[in-house]
Amino acid sequence: MLLEVRDLHVEFRTRDGVAKAVNGVTYSVDAGETLAVLGESGSGKSVTAQAVMGILDTPPGKITGGEILFQGKDLLTFKEEERRKVRGAQMAMIFQDALSSLNPVLSVGDQLGEMFTVHRGLSRKDARTKAVELMDRVRIPAASQRVRDYPHQFSGGMRQRIMIAMALALEPALIIADEPTTALDVTVQAQVMDLLAELQRELNMGLILITHDLGVVADVADKIAVMYAGRIVESAPVHDIYKAPAHPYTKGLLESIPRLDQKGRELYAIKGLPPNLMNIPPGCAFNPRCPMAQDICRTDVPPLAEVDEDRRSACYFWRETLDARND
Ligand SMILES: Nc1ncnc2c1ncn2[C@@H]1O[C@H](COP(=O)(O)OP(=O)(O)OP(=O)(O)O)[C@@H](O)[C@H]1O
Ligand SMILES: [Mg+2]
């Protein structure tokens, strides 16, 4: 397995109290595989990713438990120096907002080239050639001219392609894309997503795709991990989830996607709000919003139980949830 996150816990210690942002996340992704991580705002998707990349905001953030095995080695035991070598060369991250992630005063050619001069010891001239190759690879038209341009001279979609090029420069084994297309308009979103998926397949990379858009997931992901209040509540191959969710929260997410074949039907929204992470309700964190909640859900935290070999659900009533698919 390329990456295995096991029982990860992250807290933020702030003036107002301790926010339990990640409360025992377990997920994995293999070479050539795409894991989509879903969940509402504040569910801990990005914080988990930051912990994996080693870019958690510490303090106030602190990893209080768990393991992050990358190619079999626990990154949490690495020194910062070793960690830095892994970052960039072996794993890279793509963020939502390219403009604030790219350096505004360096041409894109210089930024892409820097990956090769700094990490690979190439000459400036060779690094420039590599930069143009990368820009071609992410299909930026007229790359050999545009290599001199600055980030603000590119459209949003093109900038996101440059971010992808930066991430791919050193051919990492793992890419984490955190809402990579959210800031783009819909048609450009699809192009950028297709490009990312294509390069991922070509380079046989592991991809963790963080999104709250279940719509984009179906085409590109192999498996899905659904997060709620810092926990994985369901993990499964993508087709299984679309066929029949095994957790009421996943079911709610699925029912809230607009569907062309049901135009005019009122869009379902999950009632209520996600919990305050400084005061997560006892039992299942989803219980106050759950249409299936029983007494046990209000007292006991449901374990991530095996539904079948490659599927897990943290619901006492996953069988009933599966059976209710035709409601
Ligand atoms: N720098 C920080 N300081 C304090 N608390 C933080 C910080 N970063 C994250 N948190 C806490 O961690 C929680 C989870 O944040 P995270 O960014 O992982 O959510 P997310 O699932 O990525 O949401 P979104 O879909 O909005 O990006 C936040 O709700 C917040 O309570
Ligand atoms: Mg986020």
Image (tube, helix red, strand yellow):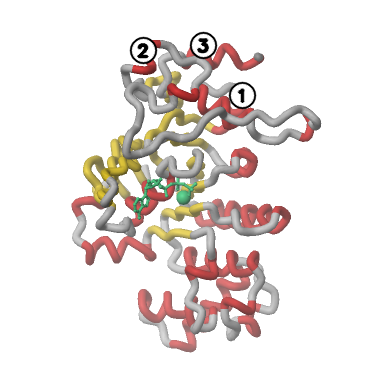
Q: Which of labels 2 and 1 is toward the front? A: 2
* Residue nearer the viewer, 320 or 136: 320
The amino acid at mark 2 is Ile
Determine if residue 140 is in view.
yes
* Ligand 1 closer than 8 Å to label 3 CB: no
Residue linked to disc 2: 296
Q: Position of residue 262 (x, y in %)?
A: 78, 28
Determine crowd level at label 3: few under 14, some 14-19, many 20+ residues with C-alpha closer than 10 A: some
Helix, strand or loop under label 2: helix
Determine crowd level at label 2: few under 14, some 14-19, many 20+ residues with C-alpha closer than 10 A: few
Q: Give the image quarter of residue 6.
A: top left
Q: Position of residue 318 (x, y in %)?
A: 47, 16
Q: Give the image quarter of residue 311.
A: top left
* Residue nearer the viewer, 273 or 148: 273
Residue linked to disc 1: 243
- The quarter of the rendered structure image containing the C terminus is top right
Nearest to N terminus: mark 2 or mark 3: 2
Residue linked to disc 3: 320
Helix, strand or loop under label 3: helix
For marks 2 and 1, give the CA distance. Answer: 27 Å
Q: Position of residue 73 (x, y in %)?
A: 25, 49
